[in-house]
Image: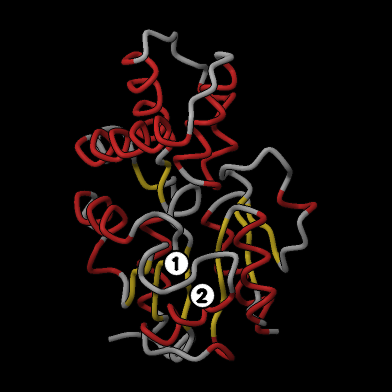
Amino acid sequence: MSEPGMRGTTLVFDLDGTLIDTAPDLIGSVNHMLAGLRLAAVDAHLIRPEISFGARRMLEKALAIRDVRLGEAELDRLYADYLVHYERHIARESRPFPGLLAALDRLQQRGARLAVCTNKWEGLARSLLGQLGLLDRFAAITGRDTFAVYKPDPAHLLGTIALAGGEAGHAVMIGDSDTDIRTAKAAGVPVVAVSFGYTDISVRELGADRVIDDFAELDAALAGLRD
């Protein structure tokens, strides 16, 4: 039986860089594409900050590092091939961030409703969470193709909350990037940022309501927002 502490509260998580450390498989697929073009792999730290902007942006950055420019049609084909490869290897090395599973257990025990709002394609998000045994944790999972808009449009977050059966006035966003923070603020939803995600700018400079360094700190951050 759940405790009443967070009953009626919807917690909406970003996926990449917040729930799951997906960088190894995302970057691995980028370097696989480079190898197909007879280009050397790029160091992970050079394209890790691009993850929050999507796979196409990662590919563009990696090509720029190798001083290669492709036409739009060529880039479209490369991106399509990337998605095929990434889907086949989506959970090879990707894992939940430390402390996540225990935090989800605590929050659900306290009655919170959980959801995912990501700019990953919804099918890929579901595949990743399914392979990691987390799919059933969430009342709603939405991606960049679930609605007509996606983050930073606030309608993506508001639509996710509604799909999960929650209300915006009783919701909190948890993310790792400027995109997540801007989305939440535009939707009028409080936002907690994690410091271990994929951004080259400290999240402490981006205006989140709370910042945590570990999922063990999430309960206190949420309590502070309610207070």
Q: Is residue 199 left or right of residue 144?
A: right
Q: Which mark is residue 100?
A: none
Q: Position of residue 3 (x, y in %)?
A: 39, 86
Q: Is residue 207 above or below residue 188?
A: above
Count of numbered badges drawn on the protein: 2
What residue is at 36 percent from the left and 77 percent from the top?
Answer: 109
Q: Residues within 10 Å of mark 1 (few under 14, many from 20)?
A: many
Quarter of the rendering occupied by the C terminus: bottom right
Q: Is residue 177 left or right of residue 90?
A: right
What residue is at 44 percent from the left and 35 percent from the top?
Answer: 23
Q: Work out whether mark 1 precedes mark 2 in sequence or the reverse, and give the earlier one.
A: 1
* Pick the front one: 46 or 214: 46
Query: Label 2, on which residue?
Result: 157
Q: Position of residue 207 (x, y in %)?
A: 77, 62
Disc 2 is placed on an element classified as helix
Disc 1 is placed on an element classified as strand
Query: Label 1, on which residue?
Result: 117
Q: Position of residue 77 (x, y in %)?
A: 33, 34
Image marks 1 and 2: residues in contact by CB distance under 8 Å = yes
Q: Is residue 117 left or right of residue 194?
A: left
* Image quarter of residue 67: top right
- Spatial separation of the CA atoms under disc 1 and disc 2: 6 Å
The structure's colour scheme is secondary structure
Q: Amino acid at mark 2?
A: Leu
Q: Is residue 28 above or below residue 163?
A: above
Q: Residues within 10 Å of mark 2 (few under 14, many from 20)?
A: many
Q: Amino acid at mark 1?
A: Cys
Q: Is residue 178 above or below residue 56?
A: below
